[in-house]
């Protein structure tokens, strides 16, 4: 019997605001435990929340970018449960009336576009951290993270296999990064995912028993956990077994899921509107303002780079994965119109440098080792025939961290291309004399020797000779 | 004349004229406390040393500058659910009996910066849940008018301290009548402001959608002065309303000619103690003599207010009190594991009435019951609010008794929660609607126990209810009556 899997994903994305969602405490990492706290986020008696407007704005950005319906009036609600890392005994989240609902994103799945619908996007506060392994006889609590703003993004069960799940998450992450509302770092937990998965016999309409999987900390873990769970569920059903609705934890080390709690023991969170906070009034003016500030999104930009500059789909994808890279490309294009060449330089040489310096792991590169104008100028020098490609690589390296103009380096280091026939002929003549044996072989029909001779001329000119001219002149001499 | 008997405006006048110093006034008040509080027990915590230091500082300011606030140098008592930095705040609960707040509530910061002298923290029903001050985890407070009677609650300590001249004025909080009912029982003036008028920041929450801080004073003028000092928008409280604070004392004109006063028939029913009915009816007649136009109005959903209140208030409380888990502050029991630590901490830390309300509220919010209870209650709350909107189309203020009876005997209702809840029947719908109301003394019953009249106003129309209360006060002597304290 054939089974298909039905997958829905729930993503928690930490928002890049400077302060927490309901107080003025800093959200930055690295403070000593419990130092980024105040009576509000530490749940002291009498303390009251005040909503950070920036959080709502970030949610609007995400919602509009993902084609959601924006609520005219949205409410924050209390989710009640006891846990030591939850200082108030409730999490302020959203239940009825989330800020955004009914959206979608288009995901590239092996070249085809798949639309994954979104049920809702809402804002909520993060909990603190319990630290269990510091001492044997007690656990510690760090509330620095308590009150850090999160977006919860819930998809419809539109995903059919682990590959699609990963593609969806990557697209979602790219959008959030583009909007600069989340850095998308899975290892640090700023982009977290829970999965809901069930299987059913192909051809049936009704959904099977759903299992929620938690503790998925990397794309790899998500893929493996889903594969594992599909197999487990399919095997159970094929053997005539029965699945129970439950929450399961992914064990990364042993590569399996195990039961955490059943549906019966699930919490009753007793959601109700938080009386300490007024409804959020998302009027048209606010929404429109955010809408007009919305940047061009990855999918749209990729299409434009292809149609406007003739870039390949592959290159355009790589260049639009990050907003600052695409911005970089277009800034360079402003200086030099050769988009294809610029694209090659960025994907090849510049990405290598970024990777070496681990800058590629940052959301946004504040200090590029090379300015886009410098790269533009450099490519323009090639296109103007002032330097050849080989010399350009030399100049590229010399330009890093300097802010100097490529032209200046070219002049100072006398790297300008030699195209003057008289001086090239002198070099060629010299080479023909010193390599008489090879010349004879070439003339005897060994065509491969020609490349060697060009190389010798280039070497003699310290790489500065115009290779095309050298080719022409050498051909003429040898004919 | 005893200094401790002075009102805010009388004392402030004497301080300005340098007839008396704040230190003398403060010492007189503490002397009075020493003489009377052994029996009354208004205070949980006294802070004499700090108070004397604040009084001296006030005296310095009085020498240097023309006082900007009538509170400068005035000894004020605070209900012990208002957070005071560095000074123990217990909320009359075991779970917080060792709690020292790292910050001042906004109201406390306001009275401090006005130069008031803080005498101490007054007793209350634990977490402000109760109507007699008997639910305090520490001890009950007695009514200064009759030591076998309750002072009312939950702001029983504040009411008793004002009535017994153990302070010049006090702050209380009111979620369902907790300022007005004890004010009526103790023969003083108490005002519950419009929801959003006074900041709730730093006030230990009971029911967030209804809690308000308000003044408890010896007369209406003091009430206006103290209200003015604590009112105003607070960015730290999202439910505080940004609308200007009028000069409340300017509304005390004594003139209510032509003012339309509504009398809701639903409030004068068989459940009313006849002496209360008589006194309030007399008071209404008095207001009419002053030129007010009396009109009958109807608040048809008033009968549901009690049920609605005990669903919404307990639902909010069940969530608000979840933070008392023994993890970060307050009482903590030593359990073998996390669950046992939670259970023991809360079992030991909370008293029976608090537990009852947490359970009621938890139930009302539970899956499968939410729609039937919480949601239904919210809908009926809307109807209660509309009652007031409709009534206020026909009148400028509404006059009712504050409580259906005078102070009851200690122990009389503590075993019967429903009976206890009924003592707030006249005050509760005001909190549901968020409108302001004041209680003023309007008589004594056969046993010499005070009776209160409640004047209810439109949202943010504190000036009108103060005007009515003041006009009435001008015509009567009830507010000047003092308990004999013969047993003290």
Image (cartoon, coloured by chain):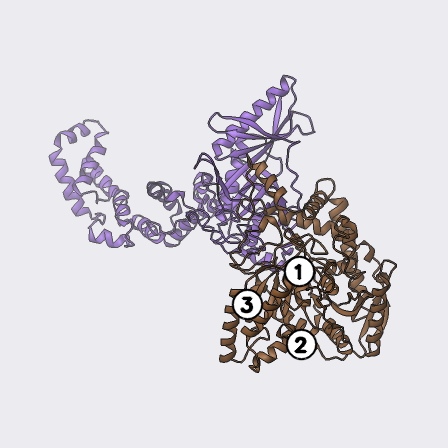
Residue at 65% from the left image edge and 41% from the top image edge: A269
Dot 1 or dot 3: first in sequence order is 1
Residue named by callout 2? B249
Residue B394 in view here? no
Residue B61 in view here? yes
Question: For this rendering, which residue is in front, A147 or A75?
Answer: A147
Q: Which residue sits furthest top? A: A239
Q: Position of residue A7 (x, y in %)?
A: 60, 32
Left or right placement of residue B333 versus residue A32 in this view: right
Residue named by callout 1? B39
Quote the CA–CA distance across marks 1 and 2.
Answer: 35 Å
Q: Which mark is residue B112?
A: 3
Q: Are marks 1 and 2 on the same chain?
A: yes
Crowding around mark 3 (Cα neighbors within 10 Å: few <14, some 14 to 19, many 20+) is: some
Residue at 59% from the left image edge and 39% from the top image edge: A115
Question: For this rendering, which residue is in front, B141 or A458?
Answer: B141
Chain B display color: brown
Crowding around mark 2 (Cα neighbors within 10 Å: few <14, some 14 to 19, many 20+) is: many
């Amino acid at each position: 019997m054939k089974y298909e899997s039905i997958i829905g994903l729930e993503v928690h994305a930490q928002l890049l605001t400077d302060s927490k969602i309901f107080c003025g405490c800093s959200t930055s990492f690295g403070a000593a435990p419990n130092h980024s706290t105040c009576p509000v986020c530490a749940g002291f008696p009498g303390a009251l929340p005040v909503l950070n407007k920036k959080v709502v704005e970030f949610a609007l950005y995400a919602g509009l970018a993902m084609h959601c319906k924006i609520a005219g009036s949205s409410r924050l609600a209390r989710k009640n449960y006891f846990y030591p890392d939850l200082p108030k005994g409730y999490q302020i989240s959203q239940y009825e009336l989330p800020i955004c609902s009914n959206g979608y994103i288009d995901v590239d799945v092996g070249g085809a576009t798949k639309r994954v619908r979104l049920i809702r996007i809402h804002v909520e506060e993060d909990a603190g951290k319990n630290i269990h392994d510091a001492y044997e006889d007690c656990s510690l609590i760090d509330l620095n993270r308590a009150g850090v703003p999160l977006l919860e993004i819930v998809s419809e069960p539109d995903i059919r296999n682990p590959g699609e799940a990963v593609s969806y998450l990557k697209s979602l992450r790219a959008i959030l990064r583009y909007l600069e509302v989340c850095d998308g770092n899975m290892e640090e937990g700023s982009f977290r995912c829970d999965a809901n998965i069930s299987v059913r016999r192909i051809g049936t309409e009704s959904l099977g028993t759903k299992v929620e999987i938690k503790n998925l900390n990397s794309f790899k873990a998500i893929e493996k956990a889903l594969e594992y769970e599909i197999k487990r569920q399919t095997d159970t059903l094929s053997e005539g077994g029965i699945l129970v609705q439950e929450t399961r934890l992914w064990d990364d080390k042993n590569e399996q899921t195990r039961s955490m709690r059943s549906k019966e023991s699930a919490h009753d969170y007793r959601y109700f509107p938080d009386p300490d906070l007024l409804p959020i009034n998302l009027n048209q003016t606010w929404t429109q303002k955010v809408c007009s500030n919305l940047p061009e999104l990855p999918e749209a930009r990729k299409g434009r780079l292809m149609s406007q500059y003739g870039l390949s789909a592959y290159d355009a994808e790589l260049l639009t994965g990050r907003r600052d890279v695409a911005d970089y490309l277009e800034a360079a294009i402003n200086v030099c119109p050769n988009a294809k060449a610029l694209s090659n330089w960025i994907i090849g040489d510049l990405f290598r440098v970024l990777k070496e310096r681990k800058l590629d792991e940052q959301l946004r590169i504040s200090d590029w080792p090379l300015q886009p104008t410098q790269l533009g100028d450099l490519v323009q020098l090639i296109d103007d025939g002032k330097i050849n490609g080989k010399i350009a690589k030399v100049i590229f390296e010399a330009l890093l961290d300097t802010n100097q103009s490529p032209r200046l380096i070219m002049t100072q280091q006398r790297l300008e291309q030699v195209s003057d026939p008289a001086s090239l002929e002198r070099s060629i003549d010299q080479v023909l004399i010193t390599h008489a044996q090879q010349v004879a072989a070439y003339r005897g029909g060994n065509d491969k020797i020609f490349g060697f001779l060009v190389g010798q001329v280039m070497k003699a000119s310290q790489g500065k000779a115009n290779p095309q001219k050298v080719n022409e002149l050498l051909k003429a001499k040898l004919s | 004349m005893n200094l401790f008997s002075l009102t805010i405006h009388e004392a402030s006048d004497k301080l300005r004229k340098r007839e008396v110093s704040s230190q003398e006034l403060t010492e007189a008040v503490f002397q009075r406390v020493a003489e009377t509080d052994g029996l009354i027990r208004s205070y949980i915590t006294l802070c004499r040393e700090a108070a004397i230091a604040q009084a001296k500082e006030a005296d310095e300011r009085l020498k240097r500058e023309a006082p900007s606030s009538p509170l400068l140098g005035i000894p004020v008592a605070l209900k012990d659910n208002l957070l005071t930095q560095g000074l123990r705040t217990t909320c009359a609960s075991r779970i917080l009996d060792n709690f020292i707040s790292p910050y001042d509530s906004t109201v406390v910061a306001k009275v401090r910066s006005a130069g008031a002298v803080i005498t101490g923290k007054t007793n209350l029903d634990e977490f402000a849940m109760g109507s007699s001050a008997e639910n305090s985890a520490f001890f009950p407070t007695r009514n200064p008018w009759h030591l076998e009677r309750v002072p009312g609650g939950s702001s029983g300590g504040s009411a008793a301290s004002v009535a017994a001249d153990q302070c010049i004025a006090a702050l209380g909080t009111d979620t369902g009548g907790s300022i007005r009912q004890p004010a009526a029982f103790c023969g003083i003036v108490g005002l519950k402001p419009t929801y959003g008028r006074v900041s709730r920041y730093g006030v230990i929450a009971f029911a967030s959608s209804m809690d308000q801080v308000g003044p408890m004073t010896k007369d209406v003028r003091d009430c206006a002065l103290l209200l003015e000092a604590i009112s105003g928008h607070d960015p730290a409280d999202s439910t505080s309303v940004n609308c200007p604070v009028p000069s409340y004392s300017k509304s005390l004109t004594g003139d209510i000619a032509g003012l339309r006063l509504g009398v809701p028939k639903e409030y004068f029913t068989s459940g009313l103690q006849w002496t209360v009915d008589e006194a309030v009816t007399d008071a209404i007649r008095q207001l009419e003599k002053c030129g007010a136009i009396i009109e009958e109005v109807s608040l048809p959903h008033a009968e549901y207010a009690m049920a609605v209140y005990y669903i919404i208030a307990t639902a909010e409380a069940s969530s608000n009190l979840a933070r008392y888990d023994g993890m970060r502050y307050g009482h903590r029991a030593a359990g073998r594991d996390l669950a046992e630590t939670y259970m023991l901490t809360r079992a030991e830390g909370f008293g029976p009435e608090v537990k009852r309300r947490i359970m009621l509220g938890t139930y009302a919010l539970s899956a499968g019951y939410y729609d039937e209870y919480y949601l239904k209650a919210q809908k009926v709350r809307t109807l209660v609010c509309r009652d007031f909107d409709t009534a206020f189309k026909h009148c400028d203020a509404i006059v009712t008794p504050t409580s259906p009876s005078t102070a009851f005997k200690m122990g009389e209702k503590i075993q019967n929660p429903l009976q206890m809840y009924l003592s707030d029947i006249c005050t509760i719908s005001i909190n549901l609607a968020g409108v302001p109301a004041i209680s003023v003394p309007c008589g004594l019953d056969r046993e010499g126990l005070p009776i209160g009249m409640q004047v209810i106003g439109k949202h943010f129309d504190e000036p009108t209810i103060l005007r009515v209360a003041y006009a009435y006060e001008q015509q009567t002597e009830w507010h000047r009556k003092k308990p004999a304290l013969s047993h003290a």
